[in-house]
Amino acid sequence: MTDTSVAGASAGARGAGDALTATGVTVRFGGLIAVRDVSFSIPQGGIVSLIGPNGAGKTTFFNVLTGLYKPHKGRVVLGDTDVTGRSPHTIASMGMARTFQNIRLFGLMTATENVMVAMHSHMRSGLLGTIFRMPGQRHEEHASREFAHELLDFVGIGGTADQYARNLSYGDQRRLEVARALALKPSVLLLDEPTAGMNPQESARFVDFVHRVRDEKQVSVLLIEHDMSVVMRVSERITVLDQGEKIAEGGPDEIRSNPRVVEAYLGRTGTEGSAR
Amino acid sequence: MATTLVESAEDRPARLRRERVEPALGLALLAGLGVWLVVNLLHAPTQFANVALAGLRTGAIYALIALGYTLVYGIIELINFAHGDLFMLGSVFSSIILVNWFGAGTNTALDWAKMIVVLLLVMALCAGINIIVERFAYRRLRRAPKLAPLITAVGVSFIFQWFGQKLNGSAQKNWPKVIPEGGIRFGSIQLDYSTIVVLLVTIPLLLVLTGIVQRTRQGKAMRATAQDQDAARLMGINVDRTIAFTFALGGAMAGAAGLLYLETYGTTRYDAGFQLGLIAFTAAVLGGIGNLTGAVTGGVLIGLIQGFNDGLPYGFGQKWSQSVVFALLILLMVFKPEGILGKPSVEKV
Amino acid sequence: MATELAQGRQPAPNAADLGGHHQRRWVLVFAVLALAVYLFYRFLLPNLPDSTQTTFQGWLPLLSVNEALVWVIAAVGLNIVVGYAGLLDLGFVAFWAIGGYTAGWIMSSFFYQVKNGFSIFSTASGQPGIHLNWWLVLLVAGLFCAFCGIIIGAPTLRLKSDYLALVTLGFGEIIPQVFKNGESVFGFNLTNGVKGIAPLDEITVVPGGKSLGPFDLETKYLLFVGIAAFCVFVSLRIREGRLGRAWLAIREDELAASMMGVPLMRSKLAAYAVGAFMGGLAGVVYAVHVNSVFSDQFSFSISIILLAMVVLGGMGNVWGVIVGALLLAWFNSTGLPQFGDWFNGQFNTEVNFPSYNFLIFGSLLVLMMLFRREGFFPETRTRQVLQEPERTGLESVGADLEGVTS
């Protein structure tokens, strides 16, 4: 297993100040082991990618990080806090945000409202305050709306603020998902196949976009990606999964020339991994 | 799977509560149940036996109704609210056809023959009604959000109740029974003739149903559709017809249960379906919804539990009978929604 | 074609403004209507010719209007649970019952054991029993029901929608049964069983004011309207805030909502509690309206009729729900029987029309689900979105390309 030169991510070791560290994560569905003893970390302010053939366990691993699945073994540490097994909304409010492979926006809500939903955990207004529109609540609503508009501008869809999410174009919907995730003021942003359906120009712009997000919003970014050109251009480090196991980790050049990785993608003559 | 996706990973305190406390509570409940039964058994053994037999009889009827619920839920994940009322219609149809039209109501060979004919007739009738309802009320909503077919089913339930009220009036009606009163005595324990008949009808029906599901092509189609509708369609299975067939089977079971109910209790009520339907559904959940054996097991168990509650000296009494069963339903759904024979499943995202 | 698509897509009018504008219009309409009704019954009707008066007493008696208002209060409550948060509750009648019996307990001479009477601003002070002022009773009943809602909801709200529906149905059955059998709870008469609790104390508009008798329908009408208006107000306000957004998100995509930091259980419980609170209010108001609490007032069909009101009105749209509630309540209590009398009179038939209400309500639910699932007054957002043609992802990408050449 190729070791990485960036923030020692081998099992057990936790680089100082890593934004996210997962150690020895194992996930089982009944008798099927979808993720086997995967350790992984995202360095502070880094942009890393998680790749692997279909069924390698990438999305399952994502789901463990975000709290949707409980790992049978292993730990997930966000910054300094162990978040293993915590509920998704708790982990989200602690600063881990994600987008979805198949866009999951709230279609019947406007772009602004979509973003504001993600601010739920950061707002304080209670029931009484809302009912009687106390000054504190009014102020908070106003500030939240402003912040939502800022985020929409940041991702480049400021003009669609009051359009219903379902009516937006595909590209705009993708950006809205990012804006919504950023509303959580996360320290870690997980992007699940963000360039699916994009043409080459869009993908190129997206690479710049990811850098902008990392630089201006101070988040560490983890992507699952299939588009190799994007992966190679945007990632500072790449981790490769195959059939639930980590088979390689390193910079773009290392991975590109790693024979095991090539073999995993081209497939073997035997059965392919079935877990996802 | 009864619980939402998100429950698969909860906050630690909640998870602790579920993994430690809830099984412990469940065990305590079962233990308490066992103690209660033993106490009653020791206190009044013959009463216990008689009550158990009566419970078995009710349980068999519940099993037939529960099968309808479980069949439909298994194939399209819909709780058919109107199923209990279909059973009620079965009993009402039976009463009208058997007693009013055929004039049967006494223990003669001719009347027994008539009863068998009516049994088949009612089963066909209820099967037909179920097919029609599926075709016109549920089919269009197969891909709609879950709320829609649920509400529709409630509406259909109301329509059935109206129909039952039209045919049977608002009050209970009493009918002469073909099955004679009394039964075979073993000391002071009596095996009612009605119990014998119920079992004689139910057991073969169950065997036939199992045979259909396990061994015929239609049965295979049913099982395939239940697992994955789209894949089944790609395999060339006519999904619409398979679902209709499933509804027909469930309806037939409900019809049979209706006739048996009439012949056991000699009464019909337009609102009998609602109460018994819920109880039968509890039975289906108890046994593991979607599981045929489970439906039968659950039915018998609930019949016994209800019988014990109503008839034993240390029970809550008949007034609380329904509440006991509903409380059981709620406890089941909350603590063990997969039932006795079901397996807890985690849905993959 | 892609350009046409891009051009055809108009930005929706500013959602916030649209909402506000719509809301204000509805508020105005209903306020005017409510006032007009009051003025009509109080001042105009008594001065109209007898035949007109009889017609109105037959087709739209104030008693029927008042009862319809009770249904409005309950329906607005159920709308929060079903319409806003998307939780199918089939046992809402439980809260109606709890509210009613709470009134029976603390606003009557039922608890004669309290020999010297415990009263707060009551019209029946000095008499044995617990006598609280009815405004206080409303508050207590509401809070108690909210509490019960949380107790019921805590273990059950994590269930899938069909299971949740059944569990709530179970509760909707058990609780009225408890009241029916409550004549001897460990020897204590808690609910007087089927005999119920009657009469209740008379209510006043303000504490210490003139008590309202059984014929003070106009004043009661104003009070009922006020309570209904309060419920609508609360409903709208909560909807605008972050909890309302959370409910919308949960209704759309529960999983995504939770991953965006929305606490599912807490939000659902809040919906349930607020809905239950209003159900409790409805229970008290109804008890006052009929001056009694009987266990057979609370049946499963009430939960269903309420559901029909919410569905018919347009799930989530509180104004549509009000219209639906008024219409269905009137239809059920007055419209159908009156129509039946008229029909039978005209055609010399003897059809028992009220017995058709099960058929009508059932068919209504089925037909609505088949043909107009969003209700007759769907929420603005549903309407807006439904106007756009459904576009596939591929089409959208194409549309997007058109603007990329910049």
Image: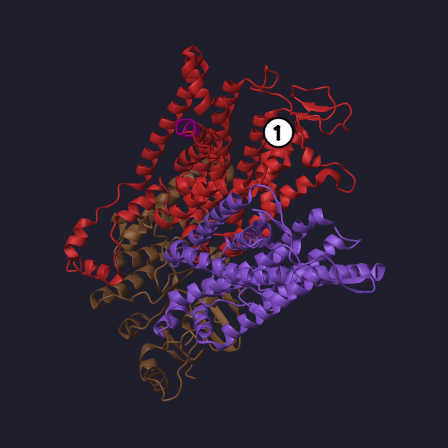
Chain colours: A brown, B purple, C red
In magenta segment, residue C28: no
Residue sitting nearer the eye, A84 or C195: C195
Q: Residue furthest bottom?
A: A269
Marked residue chain, label 1: C
> Image height check: is C97 above or below C110?
below
Q: Point out residue C339 in the picture as x, y percentages from the top left corner.
A: 42, 30
Badge 1 local density, few (<14 within 10 Å), some, or many (20+)? Answer: many
> Image height check: is B297 above or below C262?
below
Q: Is residue A222 visible?
A: no
Q: Residue furthest right?
A: B43
Look at mark 1 in the image and give the residue it sits on.
C137
Q: Point out residue B70 in the picture as x, y percentages from the top left corner.
A: 53, 63
User: Residue B87 occupies which quadrant of the picture?
Assistant: bottom right
The residue range painted magenta reads: C342-347
**Secondary structure at numbered mark 1:** helix
Residue for point 60% across, 55% down? B104
Q: Point out residue C133 in the picture as x, y percentages from the top left corner.
A: 63, 24
In magenta segment, residue C344: yes
Q: Amino acid at mark 1?
A: Val
Residue sitting nearer the eye, A59 or C200: C200
Residue for point 23% across, 59% down? C396
Q: Main secondary structure of the magenta part?
A: helix
> Image height check: is C132 above or below A251?
above
B89 to the left or right of A101 = right
Q: Point out residue C55 in the picture as x, y percentages from the top left corner.
A: 42, 20
Which image quarter is the C terminus of chain B in? bottom left
User: Residue B333 occupies which quadrant of the picture?
Assistant: bottom right
B194 to the left or right of C290 = right
Q: Is residue B211 visible?
A: yes
Residue sitting nearer the eye, B282 or B303: B303
